[in-house]
Amino acid sequence: VRFTAFLFSVFTAFSLTAEDIQSRIDAAAASGGGVVRVSSGLHVSPALRLKTGVTLHLEKGAVLRAETNLCAYARNEDHAFILAESADRVAIEGEGVIDGGGDLFPADSLDFRQQPRLVWFRDCRDVRIEGVTLRNGRRWLCYLARCDGVLVRKVKIRSLNQRKGDGFDIESKNVLIEDCDIETQDDSIVFKAHSMDYAVENVTVRNCRLASNCNLIKVGTETLGTVRNILVEDCVCRRAETSFALD
């Protein structure tokens, strides 16, 4: 797994609006890379876009929560709260929480295609996600799509209030996921292959705690392409403690 170290400028967001957070992401990218720090407290935000060279750092006690209005996702046309697209050396880290607000909506209030993903890295290189908690997504919580070089470490996922709330959906190569704690109503870790011309390969999942009321580890449902060289080891697997409440 490749992740390249690089120097940062620091752009700190203390109780700022979401537009302030995005402007600091933009400024960090324009300066060649940097850390955007989100301080302790609740920050309700429309969709954000991470860019090359930027690390989003959530301080302990910080909660970055998605707005509940779908119009807030206009910046990210593919319905993701935090999207990084064609970005290199990009990261999310810290002891804070990214919250999709999924518990604020009835489970079937939107068509599946409208449900926003919580975090989506697409066509990126050198991705790192470390320490944060991802919770209450309204669809997949972390989608790694066609990325090369991904490190995920000590991430906590809680997704028990939506039927489509997978933990990690992996469609990438050269990926290491370790020491994570994942509890989901839907699949905990899924390997997907949407395209016949892309191989999902060289993925290791180790030392994780997985709990689900669906599948703990799954290949598919989408399997048009190749999935190979996948290693899952030393994981503790069990049924999720909380079951989805049907109306």
Image (tube, helix red, strand yellow):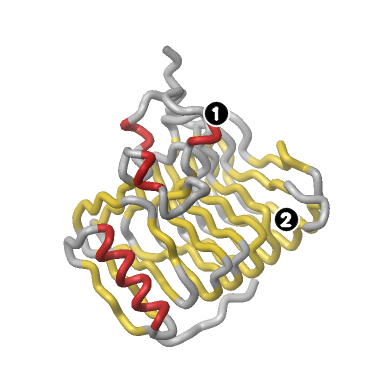
Whole-percent x, y for residue 208 in the image: 55, 51
In the depicted structure, whether residue 103 falls above or below residue 188? above
Q: Earlier in the sequence, mark 2 or mark 1?
A: 1
Say what secondary structure mark 1 lies in.
loop
In the depicted structure, whether residue 171 falls above or below residue 21? above
Whole-percent x, y for residue 190 in the image: 64, 44
Callout 1, which amino acid? Asn
Q: Quadrant of residue 87?
A: bottom right
Whole-percent x, y for residue 207 in the image: 57, 55
Q: Residue at x 64, y 52 (%)?
A: 170
Q: Residue at x 79, y 52 (%)?
A: 227
- Which quarter of the image is occupied by the N terminus? bottom right
Residue at the spot of label 1: 213
| Residue count near mark 1 (Cα–Cα under 10 Å), binned few <14, some 14–19, many ≥20 | some
Callout 2, which amino acid? Leu
Q: Are marks 2 and 1 in contact (CB under 8 Å)?
A: no
- Which quarter of the image is occupied by the C terminus? top left
**What label sits on residue 231 in the rendered view?**
2
Say what secondary structure mark 2 lies in.
strand
